[in-house]
Every structure is written in structure tokens, then in C-alpha cells.
Image (spheres, helix red, strand yellow):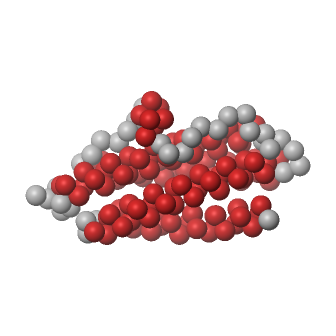
Amino acid sequence: MKNLVGIDREKAIILSSKLNELLADYQLFYQNLRGLHWNIKGREFFELHLKFEEYYDEAVLKIDEIAERVLTLEGEPLHTFSDYLNVSEIKEEKGITSGIEGVEIIVKNFSTLILKEREILSLAADANDEGTVSLMSDYISGTEKTLWMLNSYLK
């Protein structure tokens, strides 16, 4: 049985579930970025304050894209913070003021996201779901470059 967009329904259900996990991770990532943006202190304040804002602006766009992809696959996107907290592998960060510690947290969060994106990419390819493949490919390319840059910053 195929769904509206021609994807096997069973595979679409699995993809929707994995996309919801990614959605939850991005929601926690977004909130962590907001907290870092607001609370960062020190010599790197101006540089990191702007960089964290850039990252959370990108994250909020991805949150919407992921939720809409879940809907396209005929699933229901998670939309409560209790669901996000229960599902997300990324954990809340609180009270972080150090720039280096903030960047380390972001690297850890991006590393979690890219692993999930690769898993979803593989599942989507197996389901012949070009829409999800394309979305994950774009996310992975961007995340790889960002991780390289952040790791260079930390050295």
C-alpha cells in the first residue's frame, strides 16, 4: 500500500517516527542555542552571540521543514515540549556562560543531529523517498561544514 506521495505506508510510518525524533532533537537544540545566545559572557561575547543567533535561526527553519515532511508522509509531528523532552537524545543545557563550553555543547548537539540525519537518509533511500533524501542530504552537507568550523574554533 502506498501513501498519497507514493511511498510504502509501512516505510512512511517508520520515517515519520524517525523524523519526529529529529524534530524533538532540533527543538532542544534550538532552545539550547537560545540560552547560549542570551547568557554567553566573556571575550568572545560579540562573536558568539551573533553566531548562536545564526544557528538558532537556521534551526527554527529546519524544525518547520521536518514537521512539514512528517505531514507529507501522512504522519503527525510532535508539538509539545513534554513529547520533545521524552523523545530527544539532546538534553537541556542550563546556566552556561562560557563561550568554549557553549561551542563544545553545540558540537555535541550537531554530532547527535548528523547521526540521526544519516540514519534517516538511509531509511529514506530504502523507501525511495526522494523528498526526505534531499532534505537530509542538504542538512548533512551543512552540518559537516559547521562541525569542521566549530572544531577549528576549539583548537
Figure quadrant of the N terminus: bottom left
Answer whether residue 18 is visible to the viewer in this image: yes
Looking at the image, which residue sits at the far left? 1
Left or right of 112 on screen, residue 107: right
Looking at the image, which residue sits at the far right? 43
Query: How many numbered discs, if any?
Result: 0
Figure quadrant of the C terminus: bottom right
Residue 102 at what x, y percent from top left? 72, 47
- Residue 133 higher or lower than 79, as above or below: below
Residue 152 falls in image quadrant: bottom right
Residue at the spot 31% in from the left edge and 69% down from the top edge: 125
Q: Which residue occupies the foreground of this view, 78 or 58?
A: 78
Residue at the spot 51% in from the left edge and 42% down from the top edge: 27
Answer whether residue 5 is visible to the viewer in this image: no
- Residue 72 higher or lower than 85, as above or below: below
Q: Which residue occupies the foreground of this view, 88 or 62?
A: 88
Residue 62 at what x, y percent from top left? 48, 52
Residue at the spot 72% in from the left edge and 52% down from the top edge: 103
Q: Which residue occupies the foreground of this view, 120 or 49?
A: 120
Residue 105 at what x, y percent from top left? 67, 49
Residue 82 at what x, y percent from top left? 45, 30
- Residue 64 higher or lower than 39, as above or below: below
Left or right of 142 on screen, residue 17: left
Left or right of 92 on screen, residue 50: right
